Amino acid sequence: MRGPADSPVERFSASAFLPAGAALYDGGSDPQKEAPVSSTLIFTLTFAATLGSGLVAGIFYGFSSFIMGALGRLPAPQGIAAMHSINVVVINAKFFVAFFGTAALCLVLGVYALLNWTADGAWLLLAGAALYLVGCIGVTMGGNVPLNNALARAAPESAEGAALWSRYLVVWTRWNSVRTAASLAAAACFIGAMV
């Protein structure tokens, strides 16, 4: 029979992500014995990073699995116009909170993992943070955004625009699939760190 201390949150906060030699505050009269960084806070940040990276993975999965295929069925000028509209509309606060907010959480968790390397699950936190920051943010900035910029400069009705669109559909989707997999793997790492 599981006791109260067997719940995931209780197990996480009782044992994980404490610096070597640190002790949890036992409720006694000396609050100085409390761990310098609350493991409950780390659990909350990890949970939020899990949700964020999973949400971003789902958004990108939609593009790789059917959106780009649907755009590819359109005549080149229409496909280019539709993709350009997506690239403009996606620059909004709701998407940025998920995309860059998760990146900020990953930076915090990655630094925490490095500073507390001997803590339970620290390597999973660092792996998840690296996967998201490099595989999602890095790939977006180094792979997808330059392609978006090139497409924005193209003349949709021209032969060059049509040729660029054909290449864009393949290369952009390939990079998008990489960042989808990286975001999903990051979420899996964060889940692993919590259990």
Image (cartoon, rainbow, N blue to C red):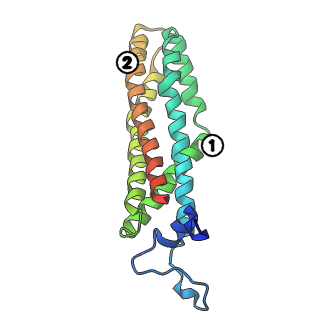
Q: Is residue 124 left or right of residue 27?
A: left
Q: Amino acid at mark 1?
A: Ala
Disc 2: CA contacts within 10 A as few (<14), some (14-19) or many (>=20): few
Against 110, residue 180 (above or below) is: above
Name which residue lies at 57% across and 45% down.
98
The residue that mark 1 highlights is: 93
Against 19, residue 153 (above or below) is: above
Identify the secondary structure beneath mark 1: helix
Which dot marks residue 34? none
Q: Outermost residue, bottom direction?
A: 29
What x and y, as percent, mark residue 176? 43, 32
Q: Amino acid at mark 2?
A: Arg
Against 94, residue 119 (above or below) is: below
What x and y, as percent, mark residue 19? 42, 75
Labels 1 & 2 near each other (Cβ < 8 A): no
Foreground residue, 141 or 39?
A: 39
Foreground residue, 29 or 83?
A: 29
Estimate the spatial distance between the alpha carbons at disc 1 and disc 2, rounded to whole Å: 30 Å
What x and y, as percent, mark residue 100? 52, 47
Q: Quadrant of the N terminus?
A: bottom right
Name which residue lies at 48% across and 71% down.
15
Name which residue lies at 57% across and 70% down.
5
Disc 1: CA contacts within 10 A as few (<14), some (14-19) or many (>=20): few
Identify the secondary structure beneath mark 2: helix
Q: Earlier in the sequence, mark 1 or mark 2?
A: 1
The residue that mark 2 highlights is: 167
